[in-house]
Image (cartoon, grey):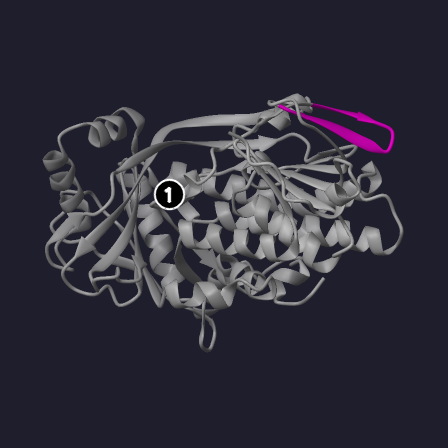
């Protein structure tokens, strides 16, 4: 059953009118709503989510949060709550081998700090991240409607009228779609996408192990795709844990996650190794299809896409979520500055500024991850030789390695203020 919004700014007046309505209560949607509301408390902001109430608490996954996104979460008042649960990534190694190779030579290593004492990324449980953003949204008086989807919307002059599946109707000056890579609102808006299916799926699970990981992340390039090991904080009982993002051909991935758990652990151990002692699977493995999806437009009058609704990329560089945080910060800054200047926050010319800001970075990252995936997800001996030489050269060039760390941290390019740790 849908949770009706508590009486907020708009509800107290007996209306269902909002200045900003966000569809999607994931990290990007919540971060966008919190960023706008914190900077402009006078704006009425609401979030509508199709997922049943409480389902987010069942998410057993974890995410790599880049340094820039950590700065943003700090500015939004969430980082103090998250820091005790966040595992800093202190260093990273990259290998290129076959799963059957007895030795995996390390071709590239990265120091984990962007600046002294500031890791380039932290691993945070999705439940903790979502919970912190929800609590901050509640503190700011953001209305939340859960368990009901947007069934349709239309724009008429200065408003967008949004119809929910249960019959509730909202009017808003700006509708933001942050409802995922298969965005229903994007389709309703008539925005087309470019899409490539990689024929791969990403297997995600948490692994327990005997010895501590020391904060090290590892990315093993294997013929079927990358196998990433990401450090997590020990659990409540002090057990050492890591998060796994394991790319396989889709048919193999589905066979592995639905088959005999013993076979899964054998295949996992072959890739993970025993460097951290005996391992055990702590959460049920799940497989997610991988592809490249880019929206042909990010905005229309009274409408904007953010996060995976605008772009879905391969996880090979671990940048999907952090691209979404960049969207949230850039869109919030665009809306807030327009409101301060007395402009119409849903006008197309205002929203096109956000599109220009984010489109090039998104396309560039999509192309980069696509090329990396095609280059490394194969067993071609000539390509293997070329890429291993390239990795080795990068490892011997400190300035280039520093640049890559800055890229991974989200601190390059035209960075929104929130990602620099500054107020809008």
Query: Which quarter shows the C terminus?
Result: bottom right
Compared with 49, 75 (above or below) is below
Q: Nearer the viewer, residue 34 or 3?
A: 3
- Disc 1 marks which residue? 59
Please tell me in which quadrant of the rendered image residue 304 appears: top right
- Determine the secondary structure under disc 1: loop
Q: Quadrant of residue 172?
A: top right
User: Percent position (x, y) of residue 409?
Assistant: 50, 60
Task: Residue 105 in the image: state x and y as whole percent.
Answer: 21, 56
The outermost residue toward the right is: 342
From what the image shows, is residue 30 above or below residue 184? below
Residue, x 48% and y 57% (percent of image)?
408
Q: Residues within 10 Å of mark 1 (few under 14, many from 20)?
A: few
- Say whether residue 13 is left or right of residue 179: right
Q: Residue at x 14, y 53 (%)?
A: 103
Residue for point 53% across, 62% down:
78
* 225 or 66: nearer the viewer: 66
Compared across the picture, whether 369 is left or right of 244 comes to: right
In the picture, residue 124 is in which quadrant?
Answer: bottom left
Q: Which residues are magenta?
A: 153-164
Q: Is residue 260 visible?
A: yes
Q: Is residue 40 magenta?
A: no
Indicate the position of residue 348 as horizontal and vertical percent values: 81, 36
In the displayed structure, 12 sits above or below 122; it is above
Q: Main secondary structure of the magenta part?
A: strand
Percent x, y of residue 406: 51, 63
Q: Is residue 346 left or right of residue 385?
A: right
Residue 401 seen by the camera:
no
- Relative placement, left or right, of 321 versus 199 is right
Front residue of 42/396: it is 42
Q: How many marks?
A: 1
Instruction: Give yes or no for residue 159 being in the magenta stretch.
Output: yes
């Amino acid at each position: 059953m849908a949770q009706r919004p508590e009486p907020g700014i708009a509800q107290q007046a007996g209306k269902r009118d909002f200045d900003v309505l966000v569809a999607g209560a994931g990290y990007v949607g919540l971060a966008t709503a919190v960023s706008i509301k914190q900077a402009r408390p006078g704006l009425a902001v609401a979030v509508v989510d199709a997922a049943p109430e409480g389902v987010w608490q069942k998410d057993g996954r974890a995410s790599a949060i880049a340094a820039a996104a950590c700065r943003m979460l700090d500015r939004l008042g969430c980082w103090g709550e998250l820091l005790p649960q966040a595992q800093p990534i202190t260093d990273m190694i990259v290998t290129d081998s076959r799963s059957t190779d007895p030795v995996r030579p390390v071709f590239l290593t990265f120091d984990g700090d962007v600046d002294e004492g500031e890791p380039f990324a932290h691993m945070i449980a999705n439940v903790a991240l979502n919970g912190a953003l929800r609590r901050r949204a509640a503190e700011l008086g953001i209305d939340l409607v859960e368990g009901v989807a947007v069934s349709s919307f239309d724009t008429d002059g200065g408003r967008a009228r949004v119809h929910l599946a249960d019959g509730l109707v909202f009017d808003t000056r700006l509708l933001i779609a942050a409802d995922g890579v298969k965005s229903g609102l994007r389709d309703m808006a008539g925005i087309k996408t470019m899409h490539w299916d990689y024929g791969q799926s990403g297997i995600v699970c948490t692994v327990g192990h005997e010895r501590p990981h020391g904060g090290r992340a590892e990315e093993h390039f294997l013929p079927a795709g990358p196998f990433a090991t990401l450090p997590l904080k020990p659990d409540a009982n002090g057990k050492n844990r890591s998060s796994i993002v394991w790319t396989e051909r889709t048919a193999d991935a589905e066979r592995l996650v639905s088959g005999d758990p013993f076979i899964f652990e054998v295949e996992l151990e072959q890739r993970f190794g025993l460097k951290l002692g005996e391992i055990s699977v702590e959460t049920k493995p799940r497989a997610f299809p991988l592809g490249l999806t880019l929206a042909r437009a990010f905005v229309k009058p009274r409408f904007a896409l953010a996060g995976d609704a605008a772009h879905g990329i391969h996880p090979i560089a671990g940048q999907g979520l952090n691209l979404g945080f960049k969207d949230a910060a850039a869109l919030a800054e665009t809306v807030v500055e327009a409101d301060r200047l007395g402009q119409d926050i849903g006008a197309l010319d205002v929203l096109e500024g956000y599109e220009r800001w984010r489109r090039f970075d998104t396309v560039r990252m999509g192309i980069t991850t696509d090329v990396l995936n095609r280059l490394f997800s194969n067993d071609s001996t000539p390509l293997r030789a070329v890429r291993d030489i390239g990795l080795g050269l990068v490892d011997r060039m400190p300035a280039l390695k520093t640049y890559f760390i800055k890229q991974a941290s989200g601190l390059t390019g035209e960075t929104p203020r929130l990602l620099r740790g500054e107020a809008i």
